[in-house]
Image: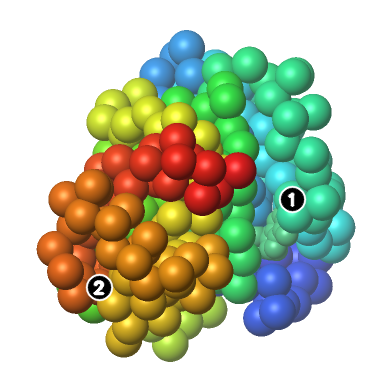
Amino acid sequence: MEWKEILKLYGFAFKKQWGQNFLTDGNLLSAIVQDAGVTSETTVLEIGAGAGALTRALAQTAKRVISYEIDKSLEPVLRETLRDCPNAEVVFEDFQKVSLSALEHKLKRYTVAANLPYYVTTPIVMRFVEQAKECDGLTVMVQEEVAKRFCAEADTEDYGAVTAAIARRGVCKITRRVGRELFTPRPNVDSAVVTIDFTAGGFAVASERAYRETVRCAFLNRRKTLENNLMNLFRLPRERAKALLAEAGVKEGARGETLSPERLGALSDLLFGQGVIK
Ligand code: SAM
């Protein structure tokens, strides 16, 4: 039976508030599995099983798939659609309430692959970016405009705090654009698949907290200079802010968004080293 028929059979009603836009296209599902670099050795963590279309595609290649789903009314549907996938397990819990460190204790190395619910895309991605220790990377379907923000170049409109946070951990790229017509029900915007590879790129900083604070400072008020943002956030006299930026090699009058993630990293090390950020 097709999953659409299974949904009908169990009287399933799509819930907009949980971002329930399910994927239907078999080629696209295979492409996501490929983009995620899933092999027979991979443990995959999925957030949002839905009717199990992606879970199934992942389970056909992966060693193991653990999928979280908030909507308990999908339980009979998933029992049916994943009946022949013994290596797929669905946990009916709000992923926002799951402790990542406790989960990592059980999973060890894993890859995230998901068609994320739109209303929590950025908080979920940021949690992995800031806290994950066992994760090799994420391959996630997100709204196209969010995808652009994740992968933006410095000094562009899309570049922001989220871009800088992601770039510190790895290499981010859009692997494919996905039209809205490939979802059921059809959303109002197009999407894109983004891969964030934690095993490539990225850079070390003296203090992750200092980096987060520096990034926050850089984008605090985008119209103001970095010098002004530094003065405001860290309560520094202008002369001190000027001297610090000169030492970091930042041009006078520069705005935070003109600094690449690596330059923000260097500035963060300086602010940390000089005790501006403790
Ligand atoms: N993976 C399926 C697919 O590709 O067809 C469904 C993707 S759909 C965009 C997102 C799924 O995430 C929905 O089934 C929704 O119920 C679930 N969801 C929403 N919020 C969640 C949360 N906080 N924790 C776990 N699952 C959630």
Residue 112: x %, y % from top left = 52, 37
Q: Please report the residue visible at 80 percent of the width from the left and 72 percent of the height from the top.
A: 11
- Report the quarter where the C terminus lies: top right
Q: In which quarter of the image is residue 171?
A: top left
Left-right relation of 93 to 84 = right
Q: Nearer the viewer, mark 2 or mark 1?
A: 2
Ligand 1 shows up in the quarter that is bottom right
Q: Which residue does the numbered mark 2 point to in the structure image?
A: 255
Amino acid type at mark 1: Phe
Q: In screen coordinates, is 78 left or right of 20?
A: right
Left or right, 223 with reference to 87: left
For ligand 1, tell me if the residue under mark 1 lies within 8 Å.
yes
Using the rendered image of the protein, determine whether residue 53 is visible from the camera's viewpoint.
Answer: no
Mark 2: few/some/many CA within 10 Å (<14, 14-19, 20+)? many
Q: Which mark is residue 95?
A: 1
Q: How many labels does the image show?
A: 2
Q: What residue type is labelled 2?
A: Arg
Q: How crowded is mark 1: few (under 14 residues within 10 Å), some or many (20 or more)?
A: some
* Label located before the other in sequence (2 or 1): 1
Way the structure is coloured:
rainbow
Q: Is residue 108 left or right of residue 177?
A: right
Q: Which residue lies furthest to the top in this view?
A: 41
